[in-house]
Image (cartoon, rainbow, N blue to C red):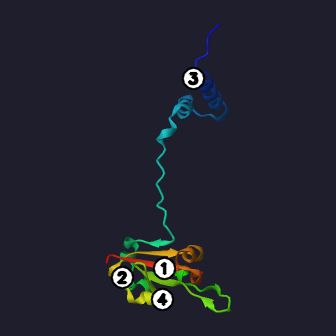
Amino acid sequence: MATLSARTPRILLALSCSLLFGTGLAAQEAAATAPAAQEAPAKKKTRVDRSKLTQEEISRAAQTDAYTIVQALRPNWLRVRGASSVNRPVYVRAYQDGAPLGGAESLRRIPRDAIREIQFLDGTVATQRFGTDHSAGAILVHTGR
């Protein structure tokens, strides 16, 4: 009795396909034994951190100050969020190198060339870090100074 090799099922499959579909046996055998590793590797997608603006992103921006950069690249950081306990709008707070500046409008005083990175902290994190009047979040500007 003849023994079956490991390639026998592939050959039988290729032969039956060629008989059914009229394709050549050689093409079916080549397709069945071709390594799957010949596929092109997928490109890695770079993930953009939506809570930060890097120096690279900032230097490509056409705007001249921190406020207009944020307004152009991450406008949702500037939106008014909810209302405080006395029904006043709650605004995002701005900081430069850890020092409080005031509201978001104070970011207009920081020129683009001085900025190393801009980071947004959501209301929960900003409140934990700076206190209860930060429920709208905080924008932190890190400069090279």
| Circle nearer the N terminus (2, 3) | 3
Which amino acid is tagged 3? Arg
Q: Disc number at residue 139?
A: 1
State the CA–CA distance, disc 1 to disc 2: 15 Å
Mark 2 vs mark 3: give the one in front. Answer: 2
| Circle nearer the N terminus (3, 4) | 3
Image point (56%, 73%), residue name:
125
Which amino acid is tagged 4? Gly
| Circle nearer the N terminus (1, 2) | 2
Disc 2: which residue: 112
- Residue 84 versus residue 13 in the image, above or below: below
Judged from the image, the secondary structure of the residue bearing numbered disc 3 is loop
Query: In the rendered image, which quarter contains the C terminus?
Result: bottom left
Disc 3: which residue: 7
- Residue 131 versus residue 20 in the image, above or below: below
Disc 4: which residue: 102
Judged from the image, the secondary structure of the residue bearing numbered disc 2 is helix
Mark 1 vs mark 4: give the one in front. Answer: 4
State the CA–CA distance, disc 2 to disc 3: 66 Å
